[in-house]
């Protein structure tokens, strides 16, 4: 498989990721506003802070996955994925961590509140994982008679 396929998938993921920042996530809250809320324990936002009942750790970690997304996408684009297994594990960890919001709202019975922005954002992370699977699989493919 060509190295172009993971790059094309990452470009699609990046497009979805960027779009997710302006789409509504919950009610009339866009993706960038949801990000600001998630990090409000570290960087106050319009008087919003996570309540004492919320655990700020998953909020901040979920927000941090956006930085990891940029790093992972850049590594694929620049052809610098030197450890495909680690790339894949980090991508899966980010995706699972970002499912936190769906699980939390499902536990409250309000998962229906999540809107297109959240699912677009989640799909972007899923595509990073798909590119990681392809890179990992390609890295194990023997080439030109070299043993695997």
Image (cartoon, helix red, strand yellow):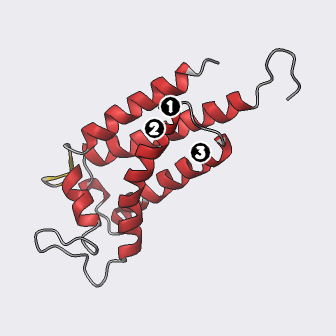
Q: Quadrant of residue 144?
A: top right
Identity of the residue furthest to the top in this view? 144
Residue 46 sits above or below residue 142 on the image: below
Quote the CA–CA distance across marks 2 and 1: 6 Å
Position of 27 with respect to 55 (left or right) is left
Q: Position of residue 92 (x, y in %)?
A: 55, 49
Which image quarter is the C terminus in?
Answer: top right
Which image quarter is the N terminus in?
Answer: top right
Mark 3 in CB contact with mark 2 (< 8 angstroms) = no
SS state under label 2: helix
Quote the CA–CA distance across marks 3 and 1: 14 Å
SS state under label 1: loop
Q: Position of residue 27 (x, y in %)?
A: 15, 55
Q: Residue at x 79, y 19 (%)?
A: 143
Q: Of 116 and 127, which appears nearest the observer? A: 127
Position of 5 with respect to 67 (left or right) is right
The residue carrying mark 3 is 87
Q: Of 14 and 26, which appears nearest the observer? A: 14
Q: Residue at x 81, y 23 (%)?
A: 142
The residue carrying mark 1 is 78
Q: Quadrant of residue 37?
A: bottom left
Residue count near mark 1 (Cα–Cα under 10 Å), binned few <14, some 14–19, many ≥20: few
Mark 2 in CB contact with mark 1 (< 8 angstroms) = yes
SS state under label 3: helix
Badge 3 or badge 1: first in the primary sequence? 1
Q: Residue at x 49, y 26 (%)?
A: 7
Q: Quadrant of residue 29?
A: bottom left
The residue carrying mark 2 is 74
Q: Nearer the viewer, mark 3 or mark 2?
A: 2
Residue 14 sits above or below residue 141 on the image: below
């Amino acid at each position: 498989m060509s190295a172009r396929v993971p790059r094309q998938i990452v470009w699609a993921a990046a497009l979805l990721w960027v779009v997710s920042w302006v789409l509504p996530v919950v009610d009339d809250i866009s993706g960038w506003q949801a990000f600001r809320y998630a990090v409000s324990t570290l960087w106050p936002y319009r008087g919003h802070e996570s309540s004492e009942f919320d655990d700020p750790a998953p909020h901040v970690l979920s927000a941090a996955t956006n930085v990891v997304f940029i790093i992972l996408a850049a590594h694929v684009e620049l052809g610098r994925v030197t450890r495909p297994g680690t790339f894949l594990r980090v991508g899966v960890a980010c995706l699972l961590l970002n499912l936190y919001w769906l699980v939390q709202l499902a536990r409250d019975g309000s998962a229906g509140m999540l809107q297109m922005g959240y699912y677009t954002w989640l799909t972007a992370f899923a595509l990073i994982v798909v590119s990681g699977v392809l890179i990992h699989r390609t890295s194990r493919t023997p080439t030109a008679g070299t043993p695997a």
